[in-house]
Structures are given as structure tokens and as C-alpha cells.
Amino acid sequence: MEYLHIGLAALGAGLAVIGAAIGVGKIGGSAMDAIARQPEASGKIQTAMIIAAALVEGVALFGVVAALLGVLTVPA
Amino acid sequence: MEYLHIGLAALGAGLAVIGAAIGVGKIGGSAMDAIARQPEASGKIQTAMIIAAALVEGVALFGVVAALLGVLTVPA
Amino acid sequence: MEYLHIGLAALGAGLAVIGAAIGVGKIGGSAMDAIARQPEASGKIQTAMIIAAALVEGVALFGVVAALLGVLTVPA
């Protein structure tokens, strides 16, 4: 059981990815619908999509890095 | 079991990312729909989107940092 | 098990972030829809959005600080 924390940290990385997928998936999906409804506004929609997706991505990558540090902690 | 807290803290980081993604995803998705409905108001919509997303992002990054501090707490 | 509370406190930080994200996400998403429906009222909508979001944000930051204090409590 000494290495249990490594598995839990990997689970945490998985949760972070689930989160990122929910967020970017919702943003990207709505962007598709929006471009389909107003193709002439695709430039504005794409700009907003990238800003919103980058906000999710930033915290998700940070979360995965935190989980990775947990995975790499080997008991002395 | 001495290192168990590291895994749990990484799980906490994953939960924080799920939260950020739900929040920013909902805001960003609605912003896409809003720009599609009123492309001429895209400036105002994008400003409001960034303010709301930044509020979620702030507490999310704070939560991930708190979890990261937990991951980095190595038993003496 | 001496450090278990640190992991649980980090889990609490993650839960607080999920709560804040659900709340601010719902407020922000509805604000986007509202601005799209009445672009000329965007100033009033944004003011109300920030007030409501700040109420969620306040208690969320307090919750994360409480969790952070738990993370920082090192057994003597």
C-alpha cells in the first residue's frame, strides 16, 4: 500500500482530463452550431472559441502537472 | 500509507479542473450561441465572457495551487 | 496516515472549485444569452452578472482558503 498514492494521483490526472473534455467539448460544440447559424461571423466566433478553450486548457494542464508530480513521488 | 495524502491531493486537483471546465465551458458555450444570434454585439459578449470566465479561472487556479501544495508536502 | 488530512483538505478545495464553477458558469451563461437577446441592455446585465458572480466567488474563495489552511497544517 506504500505506492497507493501514485494510483490515486493518476486517477486525479484522469479526472482533470474529463474536466477539460467537458469544457472544451461544450465550447467547441457550441462554436460549430454558431458558425453553422451565422457563417459570416465565423471569424468572431473562432476568436471567442479559442479564448474560452485556452482558459480551460490552462487550468487543465496545470492540474495534470500537479497529478504528474504526485505520480512521480517515490517513497524514500 | 504515509504518502496517501499526495494521491488524494492530486485527486483534488482533478476535481478543481472538472469544476473550472464546467464553469468556463458553460460560459464559453453560451457566448458562442450569443455571438451567433447577435454577431454585431460580439464585442460586448466577449468582454462579459472574459470577466465571467476569469472569475471561475481565478478560484480554479487557487484550488489547483492548494492541491499542488498538498502534493508537494513530503513527510519528513 | 499522519498526513491523510492534507489530501482530504485538497479534495475539499477541489469540491469548492466545482461549486463556484457551477454557480458562476450558470450566471455567466445566462448573462451571455441575455446580452444576445437585448444587446442595448448589456451594461445593466453585466453589472448584475458581476454582483451575482461576486457573491458566489466570495464564499468559494473563503472555502478554498479554509481548505488551504488544512493543507498547510503539518503534524508537529
Image (cartoon, coloured by chain):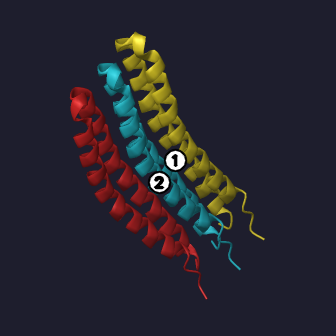
Chain colours: A yellow, B cyan, C red
| C61 to the left or right of B9 | left
Measure the C-alpha gap from mark 1 to mark 2.
19 Å
Q: Is residue C32 visible?
A: yes
Give whichever of B25, C76 is nearer the camera: B25
Residue C16 in picture, x, y percent from top left: 40, 60
Q: Amino acid at mark 1?
A: Leu
Give the answer, above or below, for where B54 lies relative to C54.
above
Q: Amino acid at mark 2?
A: Gly
| Residue furthest to the bottom | C76
Give whichever of A47, A58 is nearer the camera: A47
Q: Is residue B8 visible?
A: no
Give the answer, above or below, for where C52 lies relative to A42.
below
Residue B53 in picture, x, y percent from top left: 42, 44
| C65 to the left or right of C25 | right
Tell me which residue sits at (39%, 37%) in the image. Answer: B47
Quadrant of residue B22 within the rendered picture: top left
SS at mark 1 in the image: helix
Quadrant of the image for the C terminus of chain C?
bottom right
Tell me which residue sits at (50%, 49%) in the image. Answer: B17
Q: In the rendered structure, the residue with mark 1 lies on which chain?
A: A
Give whichever of B73, C2 is nearer the camera: B73
Query: Looking at the picture, do discs 1 and 2 lie on one chain?
Result: no
Q: In the rendered structure, the residue with mark 2 lies on which chain?
A: B
The residue at which mark 2 appears reads as B58
Quadrant of residue C1 within the rendered picture: bottom right
Tell me which residue sits at (60%, 50%) in the image. Answer: A62
The residue at which mark 1 appears reads as A15
